[in-house]
Amino acid sequence: MKSCEKLSLGNKRHFQFIVFLVLLANISLGQSYPDTLCEKRLKAVAWTAGVTYIGSMTALYGMWYSDYESTSFKFFDDSDEWLGMDKAGHSITAYQISRYGYDILRWTGLEDRKSMWWSSGVGLLFLTNVEVFDAYSKGWGFSWGDFGANVAGTGLFIGQQLLWNNQRMMLKISYSESDLAQFRPELLGSNTLERIFKDYNGQTAWLSISPGSFMENSWFPKWLCFSVGFGGQNMLGGSFNPEFNDAGTVLPAIDPYRQYYLSLDIDLGRLKTKSKFLNTVLSAVSVLKIPAPTAEFSRGRTTWHWLYF
């Protein structure tokens, strides 16, 4: 049970960190980058990042790890849990941390490549630190799967910056509340806010691709994207569905299955308005895939959704 709780809470921690970065990025996203380095801005960002890193690590350890017995460093294989949705969450988190961090550093006037490496490095350091905490906590362990997913998300950002100096493909998230959390509220969430972060049945991971960004002087709008999605359903536990929940209630006998999606999306960060504030808001919330007509492929059949989020 601890491994299942660890994975769900870990996903919650990562998305809380994204929320912090979204708020911090409001000072930079949607604005033009200065041509020269502003040392005051850079110092402010460096101090904020340092204090936040130390504070978040201290709070994280106190909230989730201090009540558990410490052990020697060990590994934990969770590759078969949650149909891979937790790994998708790790990749999205790593990618978005790199993206937001890059924009924040570019806002200071730091040059492009340095902003890319520093934002990606600090983000990966933060996520790896969480895995190290897991490695020394009884019942958990360092997950190579989680680490690999973190590296993949960071690598997607770095690769595109090196190739195109542009993010033509973005990892995003969407959520539609499932009806399964009621059966295991202790694991999947007891209210709407908890379920957004903890119920993998309601989450969908997306890769949104902008065809127009690959075509110079094309009529195809660069903000219009095609999206490939991945999700899972009927998951009441990590690697298997138990017969009873923590309260001893019999759980429904359902089989977990994967879901795949094709949809349209809008890269909100590419929509430029006359308002700097609105541009900032659009860029900051572009981690979310917009609701759109979607085709779902699961259990050997195709289902059409006129509007799916």
Image (spheres, rainbow, N blue to C red):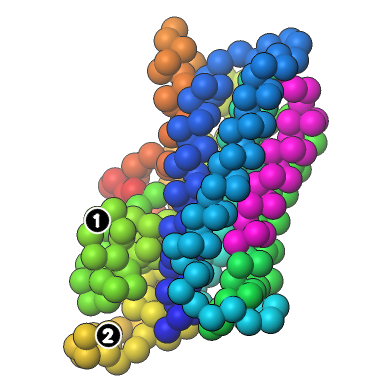
Q: Residues within 10 Å of mark 2 (few under 14, many from 20)?
A: some
The first of marks 2 and 1 along the sequence is 1
- Mark 2 highlights which residue? 245
Q: Amino acid at mark 1?
A: Thr
Q: Specify the quadrant that holds the N terminus.
A: bottom left
Whether the magenta-drawn stretch holds residue 114 is answered as yes
Instruction: Answer above or below: position of 154 versus 71.
Output: above
- Mark 1 highlights which residue? 192
Q: Nearer the viewer, residue 257 or 63?
A: 63
Left or right: 44 in relation to 179: right
Whether the magenta-drawn stretch holds residue 234 is answered as no
Q: Residues within 10 Å of mark 1 (few under 14, many from 20)?
A: few
Q: Nearer the viewer, residue 93 or 45?
A: 45
Percent of width and height locating residue 308: 32, 49
Q: Amino acid at mark 2?
A: Asn
What span is in magenta? 109-130
